[in-house]
Structure formats: structure tokens, C-alpha cells
Amino acid sequence: MALSVHRRIADIARAGPGRTALIGFDAALAEQVLSWREFADRVADAAGGLRAALDRSTPSCAVVPAGNTVPAAIGIAAALAAEVAVFPMNPATPPAEQDALLRLLGRRFAHGYLLNAELGWQRMALPAGPEPPAGDVAYLLATGASSGIPKISARPGPLRYDLARTPSLVIRQAGWRTAQRQLIVGPLYHMAPFTAFLDALLDSNTVVLQPLFAPQWTVELVSRYAIEWLQLTPAHMREILRLPGLDPAAFASLRAMLHTAARCEADVKRGWIGLLGPERVYELYGATEGIGVTMVRGDEWLARPGTVGRGFLTQVRILDDAGNPVPPDAIGTVYMRTPQRVSRSDYVSDQAIRTTPDGFATVGDHGRLDSGGYLYLEPRGHDTINVGGEKVDPDEVEAALRDHPAVADAVAVAVPHPTLGSVVGAHVVLHSGARVRKAELAAHCGRRLAGYKIPKHFTFVDQVPRSAAGKVQRWRLAPHHENGATPP
């Protein structure tokens, strides 16, 4: 029998009122612990306040500033319990981007109710858009972090707990267990952490919320709370592997680590397989838009390095620009289809996803399928650098730069060139106290890359703009490059 979120939380609290539901940290990083009874009571209070504030004559949504905090977790759960569509928003979103997201919300809803620090709800008008589409919504998630084009995907609602479907079958295959101890590192306004939190909420887990990512702290939290299940991004994975004296014993409690988001470098993947063993490392490829997923376990990846796996309850096709299937190992656009097709009403954006007449959909990723049906991703068209007709994958250049001992982070971009059209440029972040010259970086890359892939211009910066999921936000990069050698 499918249960409402309100009923499911109440049932868990009755069955184990003293069990720990949530562990978080306040602004001073002091631990905050809520039992299931305390959590259920606070969710019920916040849900009741939201219901009382609602103008039921107009479609409305709840907007929750979704840092990894106890109040944010309560607010998200309260909106779901009240059966009001919830939009977890990055609390650090710049005003211009926030306005763009609110305009998109205004296409569906007349009013938003913003969660405040006291777990109360403040009504706000949303910019009027087209007539809202029919159908209830459980939650909405922002996407577009790689391109800078704001989009919002909507999950039909209301959300229900179904023993046969919660958590999803794909997550169950990634080492998940009911009532486990789970650490959430990524922000709750991103798809993977948000949906992992929802599954944890409905599946009686104990959730530890890490409010900010610090690699040593992540390792300490895993060990201190005997974490059994963990979801990371490749950026998290890379930084943790860089810790000196990293001890595999700190991860002894961990049943599985699932990683998602940006493409994962081979040496980072192998490092984690060596740290945990191949049977505890999983990768999931999907999109906020929910068009389908692939999954691969560590041992499968070792047999096919670079793959993001095969479709899980998902059919995958690679099509050319004319919409025709391509042969195995040929590169094209990745299309996926699940039993539940994505409709235009489930996607709020100025640029709708592309679909085929038979229900396959794409978010624009490029890739290839091998003869066994395993998917390999290629850089998106807007990221690929074209050097005189030669295609350069920026990920390959960035991995080579990060392999230099002085380099903490890097991003490769196209720099206009009068003859070749473009050449490779690089924005480079150095480790504290490190100094390096352009010629040394170029020579370092030359030992790893073909000549046309070597950066010809370097800009030394304090940080590379990345989303909280670790994806490079290339549109935020300064357009200039310097030919200088030693950074100040």
C-alpha cells in the first residue's frame, strides 16, 4: 500500500521513536541530533504552518534554501508531508540567477512560500508566466550547471512511499540497505543528494548532513558515525584521494560508495577501487530531467575502463544529427527511454529537451555504445575545443594539468586564433605557496598530450568556478588569458 510522506514519517517514529533520524551541524559546526520522534514532531509543525499559510485558490510551491542543515531537511520533509510542491534552492544563488529561476517557477505557480530560519513560511508572488499545466508536482530541481542556462525539472506528485519502489531499484543495486547510516556530502539542492535524502527519509535511514565539503572532515564523519552508504562526485573523490596518509580502515563500515555528476578521471576511479575494492564502488549516469540512467560497478569498469555502464531499466540509443542510429563505437548524441516517458509538462525551461516520436529523450550528451551495450561519454559539443579541425576533450587537458604537483585545479577553454580558429587555453589554480612557469606547465603537458592539445595560454586564478556537484561552470570564466610565466 502506498503511504503519504506524513504517514510514513509518523509510522517510522512510532516504531522507533528514540532511533536517530538526523545528525547535522549548526553555523559553529556544533553537532545537532534529532531522534525520529523529534524529527517527526518538527516536520508536523512546519507542515501545519505551511498548510495554514497557503492560498488554496492558486497553485503554490514551497521554496526551501537548501543548505545541508537540519532546518532545510525539516523544511523539505514538511513541504512533502503537506503535499505542496517543494523547490530546494541554492541559498548562495546570485540575484540574477535567482530571478531567472523564480520566473521559471512562475510558469507553474502563482505564489511561492519561502522557508525562514524559524521554520515559518513567507509568501511571495512569482513572476506571472503562461497558464500553469495540469497535474500535481512533488518537487522541482534546478539544472543547467554546466551550460549556465537555467532549467527546472518537475517530478509529478504527490510523493508516496511504496515498499516495492522505495528506494528505486537502481539505488538498491548500489549497496543500499533499509535503516542504514548514510552521509550526504553534496548539497540538497542537487538531484543526487536530494533524491538520496528522500529515499533515506522514507526508508528509515539515519542521515548525517555535512554542511560544507572538506575532504578530511568527510573521512572523519564516515569513521565517526560508521557510515554504511555514501554518494560523492568525482570532485569530492579527487580531493579525498589527495589526503596524505589516507587509511582504508577509515572506510571499513562503508558498504558502498556511489558516484555521479561530472566525468570521472581514470586515475581517480582506480584510486577508489583500490581504496574500497571494486565491489563497493558504483557509478550512476543520469540527468536531473529523469530521462533514464546507466550504472556500472567497479569490476565491470575495470573490464571496460571509461564506461558509465549499461542502461538500468533504460534503453539507450546513439543517434546522429539526422536522428539515425549509429553503429557500435560510433559517437553521436545519447538518447534514453524509460517505461515512464518524460513529457514537456515535466520540464520547465526556455529550451525543452529533445525527444523522438517513440519516446527517447536527450539532454545533449555525446557518447558511444560498445557491442555489449556499455555507454562511454564524450565531451558535449559546447565544451569540445576545435583546434584547426582537431577535437580536444577539455577533461583530458585538465587531468594532465592536475597531475603537476604545483596544480590544485585547472580548466581548459578555447582561445580564439586567427589561423586555427582556436587553441587551448587553461585557467590554473596553484597549491598554496607553489610557483610554476608557463613553460614548465607546457612541457609537463607535452609529455602527456599531443601537440595540438597542449595549452598555449595560461591564466593563474584563485579558483575555478564549479557547481556544488563539481561541474565546471565554463560560462563564468574570465574571457582573457595571460601569456605571463610566474603568477604573483
Image (cartoon, grey):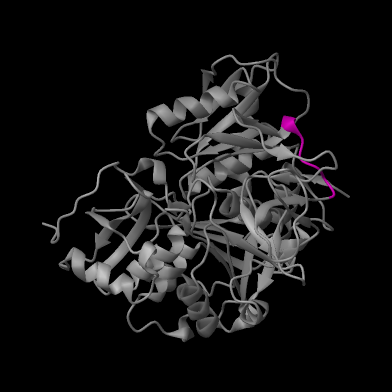
Residue 238 covered by magenta stretch = no
For residue 49, side relative to residue 248 (left or right) = right
Query: Measuring 53% from the left and 20% from the top, which residue is drawn there?
Result: 123
Where residue 378 appears, x then y in whole percent?
Answer: 57, 59
Above or below, comparing residue 149 to residue 2 in the picture:
above
Tell which of 452 and 308 is nearer to you: 452
Residue 343 covered by magenta stretch = yes
Q: Quadrant of residue 284?
A: bottom right
For residue 60, side relative to residue 441 (left or right) = right
Image quadrant holding the C terminus, namely bottom left
Q: Can residue 252 be seen in this view?
A: no
**Predominant secondary structure, magenta span:** loop
Q: Is residue 144 visible?
A: yes
Query: Measuring 77% from the left and 72% from the top, which residue is drawn there?
Result: 372
- What are the residue bounds of the magenta stretch? 339-345
Where residue 271 appears, x then y in whole percent?
Answer: 48, 80
Above or below, comparing residue 141 to residue 436 in the picture:
above
Where residue 485 appears, x then y in whole percent?
Answer: 14, 60
Tell which of 52 and 371 is nearer to you: 371
Above or below, comparing residue 419 to residue 326 in the picture:
above
